[in-house]
Amino acid sequence: MDPDTFSSDVGIEGTDVYWRRRMVVLTGVLVVVAVVAWACTSASGRQGTTGAAKNATPGPDTLVVSLPSPLASPSASGGAGNSASPTASPSGASKEAKGGKDAKNSKDAKEAKAAAPLRPGDPCDPKDLVLSLRGGQQTYAGTAEPTFLLTVVSTGRVDCTVDVGPRMLETRIVSGDDRVWSTADCVSGDGTDIQMLKRGVPYVRTIRWDRHRSGADCTVKRAAALPGTYVAWTHADGLKSSKAIFYLR
């Protein structure tokens, strides 16, 4: 550039105009540099923040950490007020074992007592006895008295004894829920009748009912039974016969 031209420009426009233009250009350059620098700084900052967020391990949740754990033991969470459940003491277990042993011994003693007879004449084991009661006919009209055939049979190997008395071996007649008659009512003497039973040989007795009611009071006049349906059976301790159904007309 020609120095004269520069000099002429300065001289024509003045010194203030010259420096004002130069300051505008310099300011524009500084603004551009600042914008570029800000852009670079922002990009690197976001990248660093993102990387740090990805690589950082999340800290513990303060609220969760402060809550008590549901798996904590009562002693840890409840203090001295909560105690562990008591365990069975050795003495209690010993008492239970002793009680079980005593019960077993008692059961064995009862079974031995009720065992089959070992000598002839011993009481019969109820498990070896068969009891039966059969009616003579099904319908009894007029003044006909019902009759029944009672049999007792022993299946044991040894001859044994059994009480077939009317109190021990009771035959009862009912009509519905009404107890009408029994061989155990108004018995004279002790009512015992001990019989020796051989294996397979039945004891047989005929029982006759006079169609009158019976009861504990033997001094009153007994009323006649009314026509209707009746049921008879015989039973003893641990024994019971089948039921015989019959009708009074």
Image (cartoon, grey):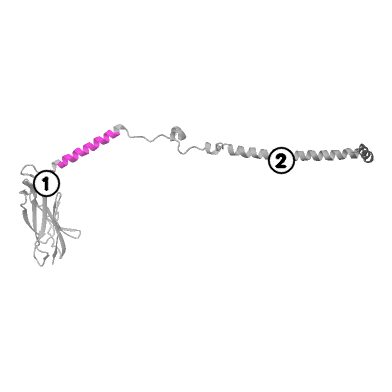
- Find the distance from the CA under tag 1 to the CA under tag 2: 114 Å
Q: Which of the two residues, 49 or 209, is positioned nearer the viewer here?
A: 49
Question: Which residue, given by chain and number where applicable, does mark 1 sit on?
Answer: 125
Q: Nearer the viewer, mark 1 or mark 2?
A: 2
Relative placement, left or right, of 55 versus 104 is right
- Residue 37 picture quarter: top right
Magenta range:
92-111
- The residue sitting at 24% across, 35% down in the picture is 98
Specify whether residue 168 is in view: no
Label 1 neighbour load within 10 Å: few <14, some 14-19, many 20+: some
Label 2 neighbour load within 10 Å: few <14, some 14-19, many 20+: few
Q: Is residue 105 magenta?
A: yes
Q: Earlier in the sequence, mark 1 or mark 2?
A: 2
Quadrant where the C terminus sits is bottom left
Q: Position of residue 86 (x, y in %)?
A: 36, 35
Q: Main secondary structure of the magenta part?
A: helix
Q: Position of residue 195 (x, y in %)?
A: 5, 49
Question: Which residue, given by chain and number where applicable, does mark 2 sit on?
Answer: 39
Decide: is 240 above or below 38: below
Q: Amino acid at mark 2?
A: Ala
- The residue sitting at 59% across, 39% down in the picture is 54
Q: Amino acid at mark 1?
A: Asp
Q: Position of residue 190 (x, y in %)?
A: 8, 48
Q: Which of the two residues, 10 or 41, is positioned nearer the viewer here?
A: 10
Q: Secondary structure at mark 2?
A: helix
